Structures are given as structure tokens and as C-alpha cells.
Image (spheres, rainbow, N blue to C red):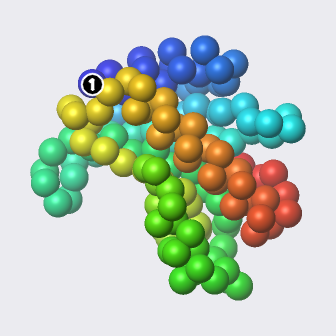
Amino acid sequence: MKLSAIIKQYADYIGGTFTDYDESKCIIVVPLKDDRFQTVLAFTEKSKVSGKLRAVFSSKVSDSIAGVDLVDLLRQSAAFDYSKFVIEENHLKIEASCLADAVSEDEVKFMVQEVAQLADQYEYKLTGKDIH
């Protein structure tokens, strides 16, 4: 799968911004309602579980998890279609992933959009700001 080509095409379609880093990593800035934007990092990596190539879509929600009810977030994430909350180096993120060889272009677009919308929603809910 040419992840960056799909992401670039989607960025062009939605009026977003696309930045390609290399064959395995790119960024899309997704325009959202109320003139807000959210940055989503898309990359491929080898799965630690199956050993297969997986595509990952990630967006930062908050620079800190201090004061965040993580159990409540875990409960809320059960309603997400593709995404989940991830804590990495004390940062709260929204992330979706899939096996790269088994995903359709439409699913990639849905995941990018969901990650962007949820990250923006929770970023605003937790910080009251549009940071990322």
C-alpha cells in the first residue's frame, strides 16, 4: 500500500495540507468545522504482535495526562469506530491502526478523519484550546 499517496490525495480532496517525510511517514493537516485544524501523523511500522506491516494514524490531544480521568477516557473510547486513546511519554494521543495490506483507501480516509475529529474534540474538552 502506498500510504502517502492515499493521504496526499485525501488532503487535496478536503483542502488539507500534506507533508511527505519519507516512504513510511507523512503528515496531513485536516480542516475541521469552525475554522479549526488537526494534525495527523501517518506512518507504517512492523507490528510487534503479527510481524506484518501496519499503518498508524496518530494525533496529539494533550501534552500531559495530569488531571485526566483515564478510566473515563477508556470507557468513552469503546464507542469509537477505529480509534483509541494512547499515552506516549506522558502525552495523550488518539490513534488508529490497521494492517497495511488489508486496508482499503476508504478506510484510510475514515481513520484519518476520525482521528482528527476525536483529537480535536478531546483536545478542546481537556484544554479549552486548539493547540495541535
Q: Which residue is painted at 31% across and 44% down in the image?
A: 98
The foreground one among 28 and 97 is 97
Q: Residues within 10 Å of mark 1 (few under 14, many from 20)?
A: some
Q: Residue 117, image x and y in percent? A: 65, 45
Disc 1 secondary structure class: loop
The foreground one among 44 and 105 is 105
Q: Which residue is painted at 55% across and 47% down in the image?
A: 115
Vertical comparison of 6 with 54: above or below: above
Q: Which residue is mark 1?
A: 1
Q: Which residue is painted at 54% across and 20% down in the image?
A: 10
Name the residue at the front extreme: 79
How many dots with numbers? 1
Name the image quarter holding residue 93.
bottom right
Q: Residue 26, image x and y in percent? A: 48, 32
Does any portion of residue 22 appear in the rendered image? no
Vertical comparison of 44 with 17: above or below: below
Q: Amino acid at mark 1?
A: Met
Q: Residue 69, image x and y in percent? A: 63, 83
Vertical comparison of 11 with 26: above or below: above
Assign the N terminus to one quadrant of the image. Answer: top left
Residue 108 as seen in the image, left or right of residue 31? left
Does any portion of residue 48 appear in the rendered image? yes
Q: Residue 72, image x and y in percent? A: 59, 79
Q: Which residue is painted at 72% across and 60% down in the image?
A: 123
Residue 14 as seen in the image, left or right of residue 106? right
